[in-house]
Amino acid sequence: MTAAEVSGVIAMLLGTLVIANDFTALNVALPAIEKAFSVDVSTAQWVITGYVLVFGVSIVTAGRLADMFGRRRVFIIGMIIFAVFSLIGGLATDIWMLLISRALMAIGGCMAWPAMLGILFGLMPEDKAALAGGLVMGVAGIGNAMGPLLGGVFTDYLSWRWIFYINVPVAFIAIFATLWAITNDNEENPEEKVDYPGIITLTLGLFGLLLLLDIGADLGWFSPLILLLFGLSIAFLSVFMFIERKSGTDALVPRDIMENKEFAAVVAAILMITAVYFSVLLYLPQFMVKELGFSAAQSGLGLVPILGMFALSSFIAGPLYNRMGPKFIMAFGAMCLAIGIFILSRLDVQTTYSDLVPGMLVIGLGLGFYYSSITTAAITSLDPSRASLAGAIIYMVQNAGGAIGLGLNTAIVVTASTLPAGISRAFTMDAVLTGCGVLIVLFFVGGPFSWAVLISGFRLKTGENS
């Protein structure tokens, strides 16, 4: 790779770092935000929920536009939006100013993320695609790990506002590095047209679905509003599918993606497994604070075994993917996730922090192997011109799967007599769902199941060593 290409990779990884850090940093700062603006937890929670909702609703559109109009352009615009509204969020004088800033930060982040994936996979030679996936998820793991730690330190020793301020210089470093290192890929006259009906129907359908999953546990799953949202979501998503089949090459999600069986299997596996990541990041800090008496900074530091192992194993998974193929690496990662969440499901009122560490380490190992390889498998299953859109769809599915999983977890936790009992039951359910994901990976991802395929990587490695 040339010096400019290396600089481009670094710029994309900086973008990954700042966005990944932002996703987890505010989890430990909510009590301080409640106090600063004199609001309750259900209102403060929208600092996180609103960001995730807007990000998840908009990212497929952003990915498609990046492929159509130039990934470099969309990445830079997205990072500028993200940085500007990070600054405004840090200066917020009331909760509504903060919530609106977070929503607009999400618009910037969801523009940058798929464009960044497309650029990074484009910079790497085809035989190094797994390295790109490993780098992205490794740096994302570092960002996720830094988030709760930095968020806790800022909250305890400076101010929660510094969680926003820190985004600004990192984002602009990534922007300037991109302007210098990445070739302008703007399309002057793109042949494809923007699928506005598809964008509108998908956005409304996803918004209703993700919103009902966020508020369903509070209002009741059979309340009139939840049932109305569910009906409208199904209606809009059905209309979206009809529109896409009629839109040809202009479709927001073109037919070559919808009909790709390998890509569909990856999507199904992600839906089953994503709940684990979202659940442990939400409920383990709650357990640490409410049951173990940890502070915000301590609870953030307490997640390092998961997030640190996630980062480390992501870097390891990339080279192994090329040697052993997608099936073994993804199956190993998914099995680790199932085993790790089952270990954590044994927690109770007598559980200490040291009792949590083995399960967290196994989950972190699984996350690194699974997410880096599933991202690579998804993007490389499609034409390179679809890289940003593929990355966006995968992230949207992760978001939707996480929201569904959190909704189910919350419904279980709030009905239990104690927090540990509720977490234990919820994590047991997550282990079952993850087990289903393991089966999908084994039998449908990376070709049909066979022991020869599963162990071919070991044979290849043995042959190389000899």
Image: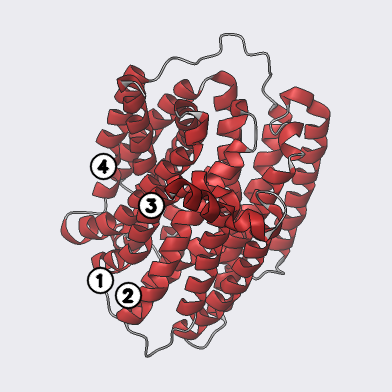
Picture layout, residue 60 above or below residue 148: above
Q: Which amino acid type corresponds to the residue marked 1 in the rendered image?
A: Ser
Report how far apart the C-alphas of labels 2 and 3 lie in the structure: 23 Å
Q: Which residue is drawn at 73% across and 57% down?
A: 230
Which label belongs to residue 165? 4
Q: Earlier in the sequence, mark 2 or mark 3?
A: 3
Q: Residue at x 59, y 64 (%)?
A: 405
Q: Which of marks 3 and 1 is nearer the N terminus?
A: 3
Q: Which amino acid type corresponds to the residue marked 2 in the rendered image?
A: Val
Q: Which residue bears the numbered disc 1?
A: 295
Q: Earlier in the sequence, mark 1 or mark 2?
A: 2
Which label belongs to residue 289? 2
Q: Nearer the viewer, residue 165 or 269?
A: 269
Left or right: residue 374 versus residue 105 is: right
Q: Which residue bears the numbered disc 3?
A: 141
Q: Residue at x 29, y 53 (%)?
A: 146
Give yes or no for contact between labels 1 and 2 (Cβ–Cβ under 8 Å): yes
Provide residue 77's location: percent of width, then percent of height. Answer: 43, 25
Report how far apart the C-alphas of labels 3 and 1 lie in the structure: 22 Å
Picture layout, residue 425 above or below residue 134: below
Give yes or no for contact between labels 4 and 3 (Cβ–Cβ under 8 Å): no
Q: Which of marks 2 and 4 is nearer the N terminus?
A: 4
Name the secondary structure under disc 1.
Answer: loop
Q: Quadrant of the N terminus?
A: top left
User: What is the quadrant of residue 150 in the picture?
Assistant: bottom left
Report how far apart the C-alphas of labels 4 and 1 lie in the structure: 22 Å
